[in-house]
Image (spheres, rainbow, N blue to C red):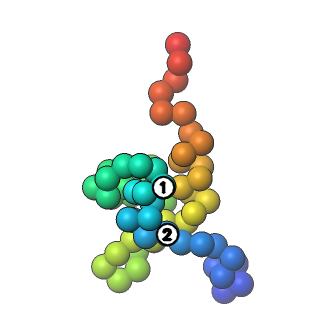
Amino acid sequence: MASDLSEIRFLTVAEVADMMRVSKMTVYRLVHSGELPAIRFGRSFRVPQSAVAAAIERPIVDAV
């Protein structure tokens, strides 16, 4: 299991906010709502880079 985790890159909330071009508060809302998976590390959150990439690729709204 340790080798699996060593291959995953985790990002801070600030790094995720920069990548997604949103505020840190928006990232916290996405984490707390469950839309963006994250792990708690002490008092801060870490988000897998693959989850951020998937969130960026997801359409925001469905076109009618």
Residue in the foreground of this view, choosing between 26 and 14: 14
Question: What amino acid type should be assigned to the residue bearing mark 1?
Answer: Met
Residue nearer the viewer, 3 or 53: 53
Q: Secondary structure at mark 1?
A: helix
Please give the residue where the numbered disc 2 appears in the rendered image: 11
Q: What residue did someone put label 1 on? A: 19
Question: Taking 54 as reference, is 29 left or right?
Answer: left
Residue count near mark 1 (Cα–Cα under 10 Å), binned few <14, some 14–19, many ≥20: some
Could you tell me if the residues under marks 1 and 2 are in contact, i.e. CB atoms within 8 Å? yes
Q: Quadrant of the N terminus?
A: bottom right
Q: Nearer the viewer, mark 1 or mark 2?
A: 1
Q: Secondary structure at mark 2?
A: strand
Q: Is residue 17 visible?
A: yes
Which quadrant holds residue 16? bottom left
Taking the image as shown, residue 44 lies to the left or right of residue 46, namely left
Seen in the picture, residue 18 relative to 48 is either above or below; the reply is above
The percent position of residue 47, horizontal first and vertical second, equals 49, 66
Residue 63 percent coordinates (x, y): 53, 18
Using the rendered image of the protein, determine whether residue 1 is visible from the camera's viewpoint: no
Q: Tell me the quarter of the picture where residue 43 sits.
A: bottom left
Which residue occupies 35% across, 83% down?
A: 42
Q: Residue at 44% of width from left, 64% of height from top?
A: 15
In this view, 14 is above or below 43: above
Amino acid type of the residue tagged 2 in the rendering: Leu
Q: Position of residue 29 (x, y in %)?
A: 32, 52
Q: Point out which mark residue 6 bears.
A: none
Residue 56 drawn at (x, y percent): 54, 45
The quadrant in which residue 2 appears is: bottom right
Residue appearing at x 55%, y 66% in the figure: 48
